[in-house]
Amino acid sequence: MDDAAFRQSVVGAAEVAALFDASPWVTRYELWHRKRGTIATPDFNAVVDGKPENERIYFGVKLEPIVIEAACERWGYVPEPTPERLTNGKGLGGHPDRIVTCPERGRGILEVKTVDWLVEKSWGDEPPLHYLLQAQAYAGLAGTDWCDIVWLTSGNRLSRHREPFRPALFAEIERRVAAFWNDVRESREPPVDYTRDGKTLVEVLGDPTEELADLRDDLTAEQWAIEFAAGKAMRDAGEAQMEAAKTRLIERIGTAGKALLPSFRLAANRTKDTPDRVAKEGEIIKGRRGYRRFDLREIAA
């Protein structure tokens, strides 16, 4: 079984959070349609024409061995042979980052992440639930006693969260995965998350036709249209408010390229002009004039 077929046949450890409504990446509705084959499962770490589709994922994968090596040096982990795939034979599986041995706690899982400091700041006291669930799933699949999450922040700070294996939580993960696959087999579609599933729903429905839908007697649809129009008006008003505030700030700092405010740091330098260049004989790619950037960031407490 190739990697794509394997991923199609299991709920991956990174997808488990969707069954707890805790995944920032995929909803229960989208996951159901992926496993049904209605829509394609995105190619993890895809590279198109030599360029990664997602730079963060691409470099996270590239840096993973380095982060593991650094974690072993710092905390004394000893790398162990790690299967390319783990599965419980009941529809739960995945690709663990690394199985290691800890001098104090024995055999366990290392789950590796690379994060920006702003993302880490939003975590609070521990990594988010979707990472904790992923690590617990791997620990249960591998039969280990613990599952540490190790992350590299902004390329220069290594941290870890020590997590014991929780058998009751793993049993709940397995129960939800089994129930999910039963829903797939029985064609019980989960409800749409209307705040997140817009693109998935469009893909599920397929291309539109020339048919005209008459909703003139549908008062519920009329209410949704009113809500959309009101939301658009609020968005437009918000964008106008942002533009006015931005222009006032530029006027206030004048020619200064940077500014400090009580709670913010402002950068407003001009980018360099991009000159015309010749792509091939007879073809000129027009450059563009530089522009004044506007970057307002809240100062970390």
Image (cartoon, helix red, strand yellow):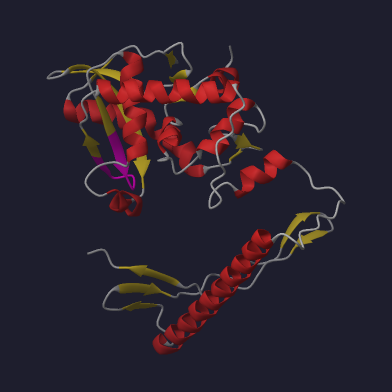
Q: Vertically, is 210 above or below 84?
A: below
The stretch of residues the image draws in magenta is 150-158
Q: Vertically, is 251 above or below 30?
A: below
- Furthest residue toward left: 104
Q: Residue at x 31, y 26 (%)?
A: 136
Q: Which image quadrant is residue 239 in?
A: bottom right
Task: Say left or right for 67 vs 102.
Answer: right
Q: Is residue 78 a member of the stretch shown in magenta?
A: no
Q: Is residue 153 a member of the stretch shown in magenta?
A: yes
Q: Residue at x 33, y 14 (%)?
A: 142
75 vs 224, nearest the viewer = 224
Q: Residue at x 69, y 41 (%)?
A: 203
Quadrant of the snapshot with the N terminus: top right
Quadrant of the snapshot with the C terminus: bottom left
Where is residue 256? Give x, y as percent. Answer: 40, 82
83 vs 12, nearest the viewer = 12
Count of marks overlaid on the render: 0
Q: Is residue 230 visible?
A: yes
Q: Which image quadrant is residue 6 in?
A: top right
122 vs 104, nearest the viewer = 122
131 vs 33, nearest the viewer = 33
Q: Residue at x 50, y 72 (%)?
A: 293
Where is residue 279? Give x, y as percent. Answer: 75, 54
Q: Vertically, is 28 above or below 95?
A: below
Where is residue 96? Give x, y as percent. Answer: 39, 22
Q: Vertically, is 81 above or below 279?
A: above
Where is residue 276? Give x, y as percent. Answer: 70, 65
Q: What is the magenta segment's predominant secondary structure?
A: strand
